[in-house]
Structure formats: structure tokens, C-alpha cells
Image (tube, rainbow, N blue to C red):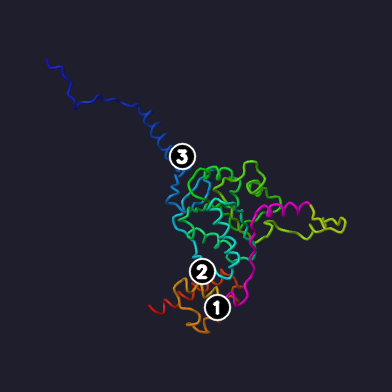
């Protein structure tokens, strides 16, 4: 009698129907939970990644690579030559391992503050410059962010755009400590660049002037004013931006038209200048942002006529 077992035959097992139902429900629950769980942190290759954004998912912070960069050409930014020179020099010091200051770019809206910081990236990327954008509400994570960048290759700008704080807002404290106040300090390969429409990053109220004291002929601000000034004073380099006059505005328009591939204002004639000025009146002011928006509209319209 042949007792050998056929190799193709496998033992069969019967599963209790209640157990099968429990397993199916468990798998369905795991599938639902998987959609809610935060993704594993992305590993960043800083040799090929130029910029990242810090964001949180389910309370867990992570760096996410920026695949489409919005960095204007350095040459297209005009009317702010003094600010460009100061910022560029400071960044070159930083890249060479020399002493450099954290930077606050403050002043009128739309005058090129954030564009100037972003334009640094393609200008100095080959020298190892990288950029990490951090939202205001995520500044509490500054110690964690800097710890992740400390041993990475390259030099990093921590970019906080349109920064401002409201009364009673404690979000500024980690920034204040990181700038100059914590015993840990920033790593040597990290520099903070922030932009704000407010010189002191916080709203200022007329009532605060009443708290000022007159001692020996000197005026000493009140405690609340001192607190606000102490934050902005921790930036070693403060660049101020002002509204443009008409000639500067038209120069910026011309530079943006050239950067976008259009003809110069001299070739396009007085009509284009008039349109540019009317555009600024409709937008309520002359700024670099308004000039860029007009240039996009004008170059686009001229392109449609040729097609």
C-alpha cells in the first residue's frame, strides 16, 4: 500500500465563521485607520533638493520637498539696490563660514521683501545654499527644525514670510529664543530670514505712548513697547522697504517686462507707460508686486496679439 503523500496536496483547515467575520472587520478597521495616520517622514536628499516646507500632519512635523520653485530672477528685482547689496553680502559671508546676521526685511507691502529672499536661492544654490520655509504658527517647532538641519550638508535659510504677532500671542517666544536668548543658539549652518509689514513685528497702540516715562530729560518707553522692540532688535540686519515713486515704479515695470520676454518700454511707447500708471492707480499704489502683475498682463496680451 502506497502511503506517500502527494506534494500538491495541502492540508485544509476550516475557519470558524465568527472568526472569519472578526478578521474581515479587523482588516476593514485597519484600512480606515491607515488613511488617518500621518505619513512617514520623507527623507530629504539635500544634494538635489533646494527647498523644503515644514508642515504638520496629525501633530507630527516634517520637511516636505518643494518640487516647483517660485523664485524670481535676481536681476528682475529693481528699485531696491541698497537692500539687495546688503542682503547678498550677508549671505555670502554666511556661505563662506564667516560671521553673518539673521535678517528682518520690513516695510511697505509688495516692495520685494519675500521676492528678495527667494531670489537668493537660485543665485547661490551651487554654493550650497538651501531654503526651508516655516509658517508663523509652526515657529514653536524651531528647536526641532534646527536639530534636523544641524548635521546636514549645505547652508540653510529658515524663511518666515509675512511675520506678525498679535497681543498676547506667545508664538514669538521660540523665535526670540532662537535669535538670541537660548543657551543652545542656532547651528552654524542655519540663518533666519523673516519678512514683515511691521517694523517691530507686533501691533503698536497709541495708549502705549502713555506708559512712556520722562526721566532726566530722557524718554523711556513702557514695558510693552520695550518687549516689542526687543524682538526685532535681535535681528542683526534690518532692511527697510519704502513705497516707490513714479520713476522707480516704471523702471521696475520695464525690468519685469524684459524678464518675461517682452519689449522694452522705449520700444512699446508712451501708451504702455500710461497703462502701467493707470494699473497702479486701480490697484491703489505703486509697488514691485503691482509692477510685476502689470508686466504679466501686458506681456500676455502682446503674446495673444502675435498668435
Which mark is drawn over residue 188?
A: none
* Labels 2 & 3 near each other (Cβ < 8 A): no
Q: Is residue 236 magenta?
A: yes
Q: Quadrant of residue 28?
A: top left
Q: Which residue is mark 2?
A: 76
Residue range (magenta): 223-250
From the top left corner, tell me how far across and down residue 148 is, in percent.
Answer: 52, 43
Q: Which residue is mark 1?
A: 276
Q: Quadrant of residue 291?
A: bottom right
Q: Secondary structure at mark 3?
A: helix
Dot 2 or dot 3: first in sequence order is: 3
- Residue visible at 58% across and 60% down? 87
Q: Secondary structure at mark 1?
A: helix
Badge 1, how many Cα within 10 Å: few under 14, some, many 20+?
many
From the top left corner, tell me how far across and down residue 207 is, in percent.
Answer: 79, 58
Which mark is drawn over residue 33?
A: 3
Distance of label 2 from label 3 (alpha carbons):
49 Å
Q: Is residue 304 magenta?
A: no
* Labels 2 & 1 near each other (Cβ < 8 A): no
Amino acid at each position: 500500500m502506497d502511503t506517500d503523500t502527494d506534494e500538491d496536496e495541502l492540508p485544509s483547515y476550516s475557519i470558524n465563521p465568527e472568526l472569519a467575520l472578526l478578521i474581515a472587520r479587523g482588516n476593514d478597521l485597519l484600512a480606515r485607520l491607515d488613511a488617518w495616520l500621518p505619513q512617514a517622514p520623507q527623507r530629504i536628499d539635500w544634494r538635489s533638493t533646494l527647498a523644503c516646507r515644514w508642515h504638520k500632519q496629525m501633530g507630527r512635523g516634517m520637511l516636505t520637498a518643494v518640487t516647483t520653485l517660485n523664485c524670481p530672477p535676481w536681476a528682475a528685482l529693481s528699485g531696491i539696490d541698497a537692500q539687495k547689496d546688503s542682503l547678498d553680502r550677508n549671505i555670502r559671508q554666511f556661505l563662506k563660514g564667516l560671521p553673518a546676521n539673521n535678517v528682518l526685511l520690513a516695510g511697505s507691502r509688495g516692495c520685494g521683501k519675500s521676492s528678495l529672499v527667494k531670489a537668493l536661492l537660485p543665485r547661490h544654490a551651487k554654493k550650497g545654499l538651501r531654503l526651508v520655509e516655516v509658517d508663523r504658527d509652526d515657529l514653536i517647532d524651531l528647536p526641532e527644525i534646527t536639530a534636523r538641519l544641524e548635521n546636514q550638508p549645505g547652508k540653510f535659510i529658515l524663511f518666515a514670510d509675512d511675520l506678525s504677532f498679535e497681543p498676547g500671542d506667545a508664538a514669538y517666544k521660540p523665535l526670540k529664543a532662537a535669535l538670541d536668548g537660548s543657551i543652545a543658539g542656532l547651528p552654524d549652518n542655519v540663518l533666519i530670514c523673516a519678512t514683515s509689514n511691521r517694523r517691530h513685528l507686533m501691533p503698536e497702540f497709541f495708549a502705549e505712548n502713555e506708559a512712556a516715562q520722562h526721566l532726566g530729560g530722557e524718554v523711556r518707553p513702557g514695558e510693552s513697547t520695550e518687549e516689542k522692540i526687543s524682538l526685532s532688535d535681535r535681528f542683526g540686519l534690518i532692511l527697510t522697504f519704502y513705497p516707490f515713486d513714479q520713476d522707480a515704479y516704471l523702471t521696475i515695470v520695464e525690468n519685469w517686462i524684459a524678464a518675461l520676454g517682452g519689449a522694452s518700454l522705449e520700444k512699446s511707447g508712451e501708451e504702455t507707460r500710461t497703462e502701467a500708471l493707470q494699473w497702479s492707480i486701480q490697484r491703489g499704489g505703486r509697488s514691485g508686486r503691482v509692477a510685476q502683475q502689470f508686466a504679466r498682463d501686458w506681456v500676455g496680451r502682446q503674446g495673444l496679439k502675435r498668435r
